[in-house]
Amino acid sequence: MEKVNAALITCSVYNSVAETAKATMRELGVKDYHHQPSRATKLHRKDGIWGIGSGVALEEEPATRFMFYVPRESADGILQALISSCSLQVPGRGSAVCEDVEIAAESSWNQQPLKPYEGATNIPMRSDLSTIVCTVQQGQGNHIARSALDLGVPMPQVTAGEGTGLRDKLSVIRVTVPAEKEVISVMVSAQESDEIFPALVAAGRINELGAGFIYESPGARGVINDMVVRGQHHSASMEQLIAAVDEMKGSADWRRRPISAESQGFRYLNDLVGMVLICNEGTASDLVIAAMEGGAGGATIGKQGYSQMEAQKTDISPARESAELIVGKNQVDGIYDALLSAGLYGAEAAGFIALKNVSVACTHLSASR
């Protein structure tokens, strides 16, 4: 497979900030993008009356994820523009990150000539970020999000999806393993991921049959939403204090804590690649089945929207589907060939493939996802 270097920009903001993000993207010259609704979660500290009813509860707020691909050399400038225009350096507004990817040359990605953004300021960005993505049964998403928040991880985002893989391979338990899934995405520092990844495996019992799947993709950079708890009692929030110390120290190494002995018993999968598949609505299921026949373990299919800044004739539907195939490095070419044979780039599917690095994954190892 011939590949082209690119960067994936993901801007995740509360819906109150979404129009500002879109206006900035338009000003930058972004021609098209994908978007996905999500639930941004945080903890809310309640005082109650004379202490009655006080405590910390999980709070959700509707958010939107904007995703688009740009030349790698343009990525940092675009991040600075989004961070500046949306004030993402302020806790509680959202995040903007990028990660290096490789796009299949046949995906017909047009490198967009982007414009400079005059209002951007040079805001310090984190260059040591990792994305952890956890897929669990419907109804378990808030439990994983709460577990992440209790560990100090800011703004877990929850999206909906439909699973394939284990249900299709083990028909005996098909009825007991629902197709509906929830996908929880968090951004953490590379140093913290050594603790947070096994903690989320334990929280979701990911190593048990049918419980779910989790993976980590390193190498992201940008600014993340540091809001963990709403309802503070002090002039400076804990998030602001942590951000200030991170800036003084130059990294998040000072926050690193030793992993507990209980988290050491999991077996992990390594030497992996994430194949990001995007296609028109209604075609993902057949393509994922073809990928499974080519060696993939399965995937969770999610819904996305596709928008153009200026309408042009295209086979790409406004309603899209996406799936992330986490596979071995030596499986990529065989799976890609299987997708080609299934009509990946035909007018019906109008497919797109990008590859990203996956450092570690965990699931029930006696069966695929």
Image: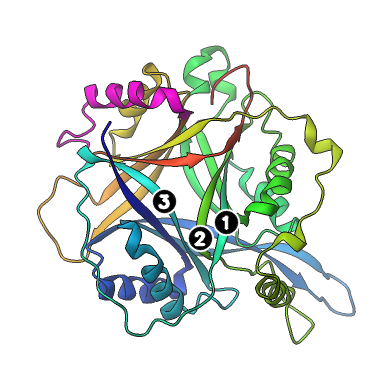
Amino acid type assigned to the residue bearing label 2 in the image: Arg
Q: Give the labeled residue for mark 3.
A: 100
**Picture residue at 22% right of the left edge, 36% below the top:** 349
Residue 74 lies in magenta, yes or no? no
Nearer-N-terminus badge (3/2): 3
Tell me if residue 213 can be seen.
no
Q: Find the distance from the CA under tag 3 to the CA under tag 2.
A: 10 Å
**Picture residue at 54% right of the left edge, 76% below the top:** 89
Disc on res. 129? 1
Task: Assign a secondary structure to mark 2.
Answer: strand
Residue 184, horizontal then vertical, whole percent: 57, 48
Task: Assign a secondary structure to mark 1.
Answer: strand
Q: Nearer the viewer, residue 159 or 11?
A: 11
Q: Find the distance from the CA under tag 3 to the CA under tag 1.
A: 12 Å
Q: Find the distance from the CA under tag 1 to the CA under tag 2.
A: 6 Å
Amino acid type assigned to the residue bearing label 3 in the image: Asp
Residue 361 relative to residue 306: left or right: right
Nearer-N-terminus badge (3/1): 3
Q: Give the labeled residue for mark 2.
A: 221
Is mark 3 in CB contact (under 8 Å) with mark 2?
no
Q: Say above or below: 202 vs 127.
A: above
Residue count near mark 1 (Cα–Cα under 10 Å), binned few <14, some 14–19, many ≥20: many
Residue 287 relative to residue 194: left or right: left
Task: Assign a secondary structure to mark 3.
Answer: strand
**Picture residue at 21% right of the left edge, 28% below the top:** 343
Amino acid type assigned to the residue bearing label 1 in the image: Leu
Q: Say above or below: 347 vs 328.
A: below
Residue 20, horizontal then vertical, whole percent: 38, 77
